[in-house]
Image (tube, rainbow, N blue to C red):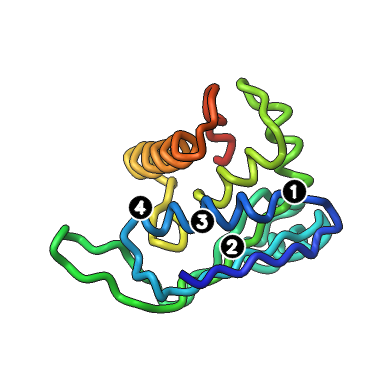
């Protein structure tokens, strides 16, 4: 799996954890091991510009996903995954920090960025949360991936509750 993490935010983040959880999520979703992903970490101003340009919404947001080849997880266990370019995930640590502090189960900015990375991966794979059934599926899968990764890393305590809407 080729995953690039580029921190352009000026904020120190745990880039290795972002890389690790992205790799874990893609493996768990059975994405071809030669597929490519880019994760870019930006400041509030850059995220706000992207949010206005692509969503026509004011202010910075936590995560944005820009799919390329529209890869999807294999539908059946015996189906071979397709190789390709997943696309870009853009994260904003300033928004992540505030969300982690405001969450019912307060958690760190890095924990929030890990959750948002999984959220971004799922969006690249075609998952959405506009409808209640879609939200239940996506957020359930997101929690399972984060919990699985945390367990594999020997992390204890509750996983961050989803703060993305």
Q: Give me the disc on residue 22.
A: 3
The reply to whether callout 2 and callout 4 are in contact (CB within 8 Å) is no
Q: Is residue 96 above or below residue 6?
A: above
Q: CA distance from mark 2 to mark 1?
A: 13 Å
Secondary structure of the residue carrying tag 1 is: helix
Q: In which quadrant of the rendered view does residue 98 lie?
A: top right
Q: CA distance from mark 2 to mark 4?
A: 18 Å
Q: CA distance from mark 4 to mark 1?
A: 25 Å
Comparing marks 2 and 4, which lies closer to the viewer?
4
75 vs 154, nearest the viewer: 154
Name the residue that disc number 2 marks. Answer: 89
Name the residue that disc number 1 marks. Answer: 93
Q: Earlier in the sequence, mark 4 or mark 1?
A: 4
Q: Position of residue 83 (x, y in %)?
A: 35, 77
Q: CA distance from mark 4 to mark 3?
A: 10 Å
Name the residue that disc number 4 marks. Answer: 28
The reply to whether callout 2 and callout 3 are in contact (CB within 8 Å) is yes
């Amino acid at each position: 799996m080729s995953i690039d993490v580029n921190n352009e935010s000026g904020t120190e983040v745990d880039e290795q954890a972002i890389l690790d959880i992205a790799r874990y999520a893609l493996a768990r979703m059975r994405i071809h091991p030669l597929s490519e992903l880019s994760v870019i970490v930006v400041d509030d101003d850059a995220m706000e510009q992207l949010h206005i340009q692509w969503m026509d919404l004011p202010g910075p947001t936590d995560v944005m996903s820009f799919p390329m080849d529209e890869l999807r997880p294999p539908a059946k266990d015996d189906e071979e995954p397709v190789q390709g370019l997943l696309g870009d995930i853009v994260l904003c640590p300033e928004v992540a920090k505030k969300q982690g502090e405001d969450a019912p189960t307060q958690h760190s900015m890095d924990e929030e960025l890990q959750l948002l990375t999984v959220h971004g991966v799922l969006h690249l794979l075609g998952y959405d949360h506009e409808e209640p059934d879609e939200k239940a599926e996506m957020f359930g899968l997101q929690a399972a991936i984060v919990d699985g990764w945390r367990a594999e890393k020997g992390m204890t305590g509750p996983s961050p509750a989803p703060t993305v809407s």
